[in-house]
Image: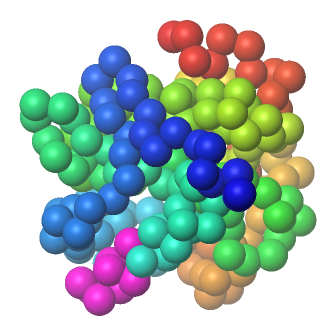
Amino acid sequence: MSQAAFLPPELTTEQLLLRRWRPEDRPAFAAMNADPRVMRHFPSLLSREESDATADRVEAFFQKHGYGLWAVEVPGSAPFAGFIGLSSPRFEAHFTPCVEIGWRLAAEHWGRGYATEGARAALRFAFETLALDEVVALTAAGNLPSRRVMEKLGMTRDPADDFDHPSIDAGHPLRRHVLYRIARSGNRGVGRA
Ligand SMILES: CC(C)(COP(=O)(O)OP(=O)(O)OC[C@H]1O[C@@H](n2cnc3c(N)ncnc32)[C@H](O)[C@@H]1OP(=O)(O)O)[C@@H](O)C(=O)NCCC(=O)NCCS
């Protein structure tokens, strides 16, 4: 039997439920992906079809690995607020193959600590359940809120790891990316704040 069969289907935190996606999450996900505030640090907004294709890829990753970019529910408040979780880049770079932690929340849910809280649970899962040695995070260099989340998680950036994202055209202002890393051995207390 594969590892996936033994993994917990959801993670809970003080304020959040990180769960598998449902078909009814897709309209709210498409609305986020069409919001210029949410997509400010991405090259383009997503159409409904592109958003659904992203959700399909998330689902395929869950089916293969048993974990992934969990749907974020705020119990009693919001059935779907975005995603937080683990994935693997589909491009090749000096740090791949790797497991990446990532997040994208609808703008009305920003500023409440949700990304950091959910990501702490995802990191704990990565180190304690999957026993990974390292998790990375990457973002456009100018995405300061996302970088702040990485820093609050205890992740660190070496400027020597900065890279040009291979799917973004040369000369595009979002091409330059930063890479943050955290190792299991450097992960003391990540789940306890
Ligand atoms: C990145 C994102 C998930 C953060 O979600 P969140 O729940 O608001 O995050 P948190 O509340 O846990 O932490 C955000 C931190 O960024 C800080 N921040 C917000 N805007 C900032 C800015 N313009 N410059 C610097 N820091 C900023 C907040 O003050 C907070 O830090 P603090 O706790 O020290 O005050 C959310 O902004 C988002 O979905 N953005 C759009 C999608 C995206 O860019 N995803 C990441 C792609 S790599």
Main secondary structure found in the magenta portion = helix
Q: What colour scheme governs how the chains and residues are painted in the rendered image of this protein? A: rainbow
Name the spot of residue 26 as percent of width and height, x first: 23, 69
User: Would residue 184 appear left or right of 29 to someone viewing this image?
Assistant: right
Q: Is residue 188 above or below residue 59?
A: above
Q: Quadrant of residue 61?
A: bottom right
Q: Residue at x 85, y 59 (%)?
A: 95
Across and down, in percent, residue 65 comes to 64, 60
Q: Nearer the viewer, residue 190 or 66?
A: 66
Q: Residue at x 55, y 10 (%)?
A: 192
- Residue 178 seen anywhere in this rendered image of the structure: no
Q: Which residue is painted at 38% across and 72% down in the image? A: 55
All told, the count of numbered labels is 0
Q: Which residue ends up furthest to the front in the rendered image?
A: 1
Asked if residue 48 lies in the magenta stretch, the reply is: yes
Is-magenta flag for residue 149?
A: no
Residue 121 appears in view: yes
- Considering only vertical position in the picture, is 131 above or below 138? above
Region in magenta: 46-55
Asked whether 42 or 104 is in front, the reply is: 104
Image x and y of residue 188, in percent: 73, 13
Q: Which residue corresponds to the image point at 73% horizontal and 40% vertical from the top-left? A: 130
Quadrant location of the N terminus in the rendered image? bottom right
* Residue 103 pos. (x, y %): 45, 49
Please give left or right for residue 61 compared with residue 38 in the image.
right
170 on left or right of 107: right
Residue sitting nearer the eye, 117 or 164? 117
Look at the picture and state if 79 lies above or below 65: above
Left-right relation of 145 to 164? left
Out of 17 and 171, give the one closest to the viewer: 17
